[in-house]
Amino acid sequence: VQLQASGGGLVQPGGSLRLSCAASRSIFNFNVMGWYRQAPGTQRELVAVISTYGSTNYADSAKGRFTISRDNAKNTVDLQMNSLKPEDTAVYYCSAERRPYTYWGQGTQVTVSS
């Protein structure tokens, strides 16, 4: 599967962005779809994941500010990010997991700065 992430950009602290990930084929059979991020000099970390039937899990840093959603009919996974902080600055990656494999998109840059 090919994953195309979009929606990144430059936003001021407190602002919002919506990331979207479009898959090249059906995502229904992928157990978990998710968003991860990687800031310079750090390891890639989980932001949020969503199961086939909508169960979600968020990093503590994302709880209450970010919302992940999944549309199995459109083969998309979105991440609505509100109340953005400078520490949210990173490259955000979409993922599709069907054990034992995980597929990654190319990443989209999010920069939170005044």
Image: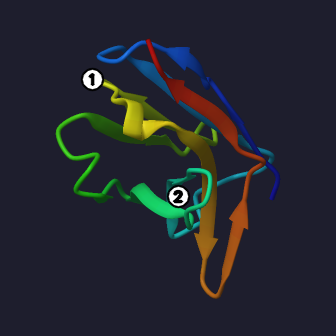
Reading the chain from its start, which is encountered first: label 2 or label 1?
Answer: 2
On the image, which quarter does residue 82 sit in? top left
* Disc 2 target residue: 33
Q: Could you tell me how far apart the alpha carbons at marks 2 and 1 are, in whole angstroms?
A: 23 Å
Query: Mark 1 and mark 2 in contact (Cβ < 8 Å)?
Result: no
From the top left corner, tell me how far across and down residue 21 is, in percent. 64, 39
**Viewer-proximal residue among 25 and 101:** 101
From the top left corner, tell me how far across and down residue 41 is, in percent. 61, 60
Residue 4's disc number: none
Label 1 packing within 10 angstroms: few (<14), some (14-19), many (20+): some
- Residue in view at x 38 percent, y 17 percent: 16
Mark 2 or mark 1, whichever is nearer to me: 1
Q: Give the position of the C terminus as an image quadrant.
A: top left
Q: Residue furthest bottom?
A: 100
Residue type marked 1: Ser
Q: Give the position of the N terminus as an image quadrant.
A: bottom right
Q: Secondary structure at mark 2?
A: strand
Is residue 47 rendered to the left or right of residue 65?
right
Residue type marked 2: Met
On the image, which quarter does residue 59 sit in? bottom left
- Residue in view at x 27 percent, y 23 percent: 83
From the top left corner, tell me how far across and down residue 18 is, in percent. 48, 24
Vertical arrangement, residue 72 with respect to residue 48, above or below: above
* Disc 1 target residue: 83
Q: Secondary structure at mark 1?
A: loop
**Viewer-proximal residue among 107 and 24:** 107
Vertical arrangement, residue 96 with respect to residue 83, above or below: below
Is residue 69 rendered to the left or right of residue 98?
left
On the image, which quarter does residue 64 sit in? top left
